[in-house]
Amino acid sequence: MTQQITHSELDEVVKRSPRKWVYLFSEGNASMRELLGGKGAGVAEMTNAGLPVPPGFTITTEACNSYYDSNRQFPEGVWEQVKAALAIVEKQTGKGFGSKENPLLVSVRSGAKFSMPGMMDTVLNLGINDETVLGLVALTGDERFAYDAYRRFIQMFSKIVLDTNPQDFEEVLERYKHEAGVKTDAEIPAEDLKKLVGEFKQIAERASGQPFPTDVYQQLHKAIEAVFSSWNNKRAIDYRNFNKIPHNLGTGVNVQSMVFGNMGNNSGTGVAFTRNPAHGEKKLYGEYLLNAQGEDVVAGIRTPSPISKLEQELPEVYQQFLEIAQRLEKHYRDMQDLEFTVEKGKLYMLQTRSGKRNAGAAVKIAVDMVEEGLITPEEAVKRVEPSQVYQLLLPRFDEAEKRRAEQEGRLLAKGLNASPGAAFGKAIFDADRAEELGKAGTPVVLVRPETSPDDVHGMLVAKGILTARGGATSHAAVVARGLGLPCVAGCEGIRVSEEQHLFRVVGSDLVIKEGDDISIDGATGEVFAGIIKTVDADFDKETDLKKLLGWADGFRKLGVWANADYPRDAKRAVTFGAQGIGLCRTEHMFMEQERLPIVQKMILAKTKEEREAALEQLLPFQQSDFKGLFEAMVDPQTNEGYPVVIRLIDPPLHEFLPSYEELLVEVTRLETQGGHEAELAEKRQMLEAVGAMREMNPMLGLRGCRLGLLFPEINVMQTRAILGAAAELEKEGKKLHPKIMIPLVGHVNELKEVRRQLEATAAGIADDAGKPIDYKFGTMIELPRAALTADRIAEVSDFFSFGTNDLTQTTFGFSRDDAEGKFLLRYVEGLEEPGLKDKVKILPVNPFQTLDRDGVGQLVAMAVEKGRKTNPDIELGICGEHGGDPDSIEFCNEVGLNYVSCSPFRVPVARLAAAQAALSRAEKDR
Ligand code: ADP
Ligand code: MG
Ligand code: MG
């Protein structure tokens, strides 16, 4: 009844305005977040659900945007509508704004579409002046309360609207507490508060150079403007940049009648989550303070009590709050973050929003809610961030131990958080020693100035990697991510001495020597002295996560495979849910210690015969490698093998030889020392060979399929090893599906020729086996020319795998080895421009991490289309870092690849991301 009358009064004013700028809480609802902001939509929804919400109204985000468009003036009609709405609130509460007898006080609260906690401003207790405060005293009979509200108002208004230094007030407040001999604000006697108010006003006037506004409408006008302005304060802008929230959304302004939590010990204020945001348990979690107002809980002046204690202190309020919390959670079908205030035993709800939660809680809450019948599996899958899944699977420091280490001053330095996870072990400064100790079971953290492929054998057994140089995509970072190893890279706070086997901590005389224990956290970049124990994640025990991923599997269209070079990685990938190996790089096998000399003999061979002899020696090694990998990928129940893609040798051969510079130094040393004739001759020979192989641009040089065309016997050996291993297992009754991948094809003739050479070998082995082997030949699409001519290439290829690392390198013309260190990260960060306020960003993201849809993506899309045109059965996948990146996975889903392949630890992430991509595609198509 009252509602109808009241609405029409506002409607009259709206009719005369260009637009409706103001919505009473009773006019809004949860779906209006864009227009009313999250807070406004939330209080409106609660109001209409009949929950106890102090009456008020919301000024729209459109009004905020128009305010900016019209040179920071209130757009026409806003102020008139505010006054009309306020008149309605006066009726609803029976109070008068500015009234001496029964004053209405309001809060003026910001609230944007996306919650930006603490970034924008809110003013409480607005509407107090020297006259209305007397009304407040008369009405409540509580002088202390009235003047406490007054001083809070001056304090907040000054800080937010007049932009004065809050410290000035705090100092005076402290002095009063000291003089009164009390500990908390709530204990300052009324008489003192009155004086305090006087002083506060003087501070405000001095700082702003104007009399403190006594007109309540003027107060309101200024506060609304201040909230509009807070949308563009630096804090808020930084927050939006970091969280990728658009800058043009604007904030709503909520004007709401005040309720008072500071009216004695049957009043109070608090915040609560409907479930535990740290681990997801279904139990109210939060805290409150009696006799306090909103900001006191977070301000940390008094220690709040856990929400469970409210059950004893105010049992009826607690019961009611519990019921409301449950109702809101059911209503929103998500965990809620609530704010409430109790005034003289009566509960009021002030805010509800979806609560932020950590990775473990996100998964548990999503799965629990499905089981409670609250949400569908589809919604659960959409709610968890892929990055949260990744975090869940990593070892982490024991919290208590970490805190102790911090207190003991054992935090040494902070570098780049290059690959998440935590680890401890003995600091070891060379890869050989690390391998030795690691194999003997000693936990090792490999510390290097930076790493290179020569260090890989040490990295394989290390628990973590620490480098002083190199960026987020340096060798150390990329390899560590691939291995799922924690890595802190580019840690400039340490100086590594390779010769002395130690590192120094910059700016202190601390030294960590070989064998000293250290601990690193790759998620934060922190490096500690001593051991901080870690707690392991165990995928098998993550039952909630497994359930969630099981649902995800039902939604996704993309297959999820893994990149794995070793049986150990392959097995892990299968437990994580991989359905195949999308990339096995064979060169790592060549790098292993006992094989490297043979590989070098093969490379340095003068004749084909010599080379074949060395290859013959390598064959059994390779064959057993492949057998191990295939075995790891056979389902023991069905004996059916998952597909395994093995890439023939790819890197330039000099990578298997000592570096030219090193050799030169060695030879010179031996020459000057004299007396080492045999050794010298050998080194000279090597130097000559390496010198002859040197290239200006090895990444564009003799590598990939080009090697096989010049030295077919290498590919032949690898093919024999692959199919020989398959034949052995077929004999045991296993069903294998090996796929042989020929890298770096740019012209169809390259592939044609390599394939011709290998088909003969393959057919021979299949004949010997007496059984057909289901092998396939395919290529990587990693050069722009391959993408442009994919139709021709597809005619001789059973599958394509997009090698988007090289494709990005060759499309941009960015060297993968140097670009990040030299300029690429600067491109992403933004370049400083004198005279410009903002940095100039050249690229939005690092294209080696997230696939560049506009450029590289076009090539991929084109190759997909052309490839399928000439070979409709062609199987299409992606390997390389992008295969585990959620945004790139979405792209792969869009262009219709068959699968993505990523490092084993990324498989669960990819399963979820692929499901989300499929679901959001389906939504768009609907
Ligand atoms: P934030 O977005 O920073 O949380 P809010 O607008 O929610 O800012 O306000 C902060 C706190 O101020 C609230 O949690 C509540 O305790 C208090 N508050 C806001 N409006 C009122 C009101 N009308 N009555 C009583 N307290 C209020
Ligand atoms: Mg709030
Ligand atoms: Mg490549």
Image (cartoon, grey):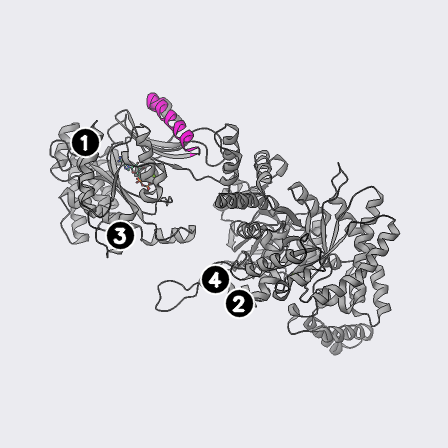
Q: Earlier in the sequence, mark 2 or mark 1?
A: 1
281 left or right, relative to 720: left
Provide the residue designation for mark 1. Answer: 5
Is residue 321 found inside the magenta-colored segment of the image? yes
Between the C-alphas of marks 2 and 1, the distance is 69 Å
Structural crowding at the residue carrying mark 3, measured as other residues with C-alpha within 10 Å and reported as few (<14), some (14–19) or many (≥20): some
Location of residue 407 with respect to 599 vertically, above or below: above
Label total for image? 4
Q: Secondary structure at mark 1?
A: helix
Q: Amino acid at mark 3?
A: Ser
Provide the residue designation for mark 2. Answer: 822
Looking at the image, is mark 2 or mark 4 nearer the viewer?
A: 4
View quadrant of ligand 2: top left
Q: Earlier in the sequence, mark 1 or mark 4?
A: 1
Provide the residue designation for mark 3. Answer: 66
Q: Secondary structure at mark 2?
A: helix
